[in-house]
Image (cartoon, rainbow, N blue to C red):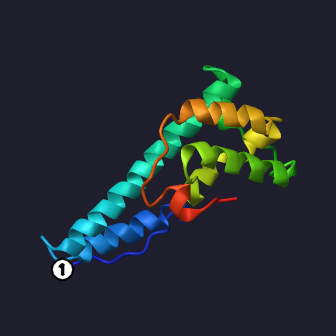
């Protein structure tokens, strides 16, 4: 018997929940179960890659000690989320060129703080290239999904 209950989930986690439900429903030992397990593992690996890449980019841009704190910065109420939307789009595309698709999940990390801190595209390109020595080629790659911004 399955217990059914409703619980709010973060929109960024909806894809994981989708894969998890497909995995649970797939017949044990089936090719379908194996394929869905791989999709779930790829999604989790993508998230791990994005988490570590953005943390390293933050450290490279803002310093080892300051980077993690700067990336957690939230603007005060009443201030616009982003100073320059075109710059944010450019920085996201630059990151994705070197590190793969940031996806909806990764957008929460950007939080536009890198853009609002005045980071230039050249700085982002250099930090992203250093942070992402290898380009991911899973289905979550920007090669397959295109750019997020």
Give the quarter of the image for residue 122: top right
- Residue toward you, 67 or 74: 67
Q: Is residue 126 left or right of residue 144?
A: right
Q: Residues within 10 Å of mark 1 (few under 14, many from 20)?
A: few
Residue positioned 71% across, 36% down in the render: 124
Q: Residue at x 16, y 74 (%)?
A: 30
Q: Nearer the viewer, residue 8 or 107?
A: 107
In the picture of the structure, the residue carrying the numbered disc 1 is: 1
Q: Is residue 58 left or right of residue 134?
A: right
Image x and y of residue 87, in percent: 82, 48
Check the image and report above or below for 92 versus 67.
Answer: below
| On screen, residue 146 above or below 132 | below
Q: Look at the image and tell me whether residue 99 can be seen.
A: yes
Q: Quadrant of residue 35?
A: bottom left
Report helix, strand or loop for mark 1.
loop
Q: Is residue 16 left or right of residue 92?
A: left
Quarter of the rendering containing residue 55: top right
Residue 56 seen in render:
no
Name the residue located 50 percent from the left edge and 34 percent from the top edge.
Answer: 133
Identify the residue at horizontal 69%, vertical 49% (top origin): 92
Which quadrant would the C terminus be assigned to in this image? bottom right
Q: How many marks?
A: 1
**Quadrant where the N terminus is found in the figure:** bottom left
Name the residue furthest left: 29
Percent across and percent down for residue 93 are 69, 51
Q: In screen coordinates, is 89 left or right of 12? A: right
Query: Compared to 140, does 57 lie above or below?
Result: above
Measured as percent of width and height from the top left, residue 76 is found at: 81, 44
């Amino acid at each position: 018997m399955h217990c059914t209950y409703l619980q709010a989930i973060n929109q960024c986690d909806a894809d994981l929940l989708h894969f998890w439900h497909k995995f649970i429903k797939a017949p044990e030992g089936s090719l379908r179960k194996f394929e869905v397990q791989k999709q779930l593992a790829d999604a989790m690996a993508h998230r791990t890659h994005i988490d570590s890449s953005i943390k390293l980019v933050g450290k490279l841009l803002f310093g080892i000690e300051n980077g993690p704190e700067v990336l957690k910065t939230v603007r005060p109420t009443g201030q616009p989320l982003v100073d320059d939307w075109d710059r944010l789009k450019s920085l996201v595309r630059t990151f994705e060129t070197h590190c793969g698709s940031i996806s909806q999940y990764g957008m929460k990390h950007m939080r536009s703080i890198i853009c609002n801190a005045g980071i230039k595209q050249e700085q982002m390109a250099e930090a992203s290239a250093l942070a992402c020595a290898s380009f991911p080629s899973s289905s979550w790659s920007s090669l397959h999904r295109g750019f997020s911004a």
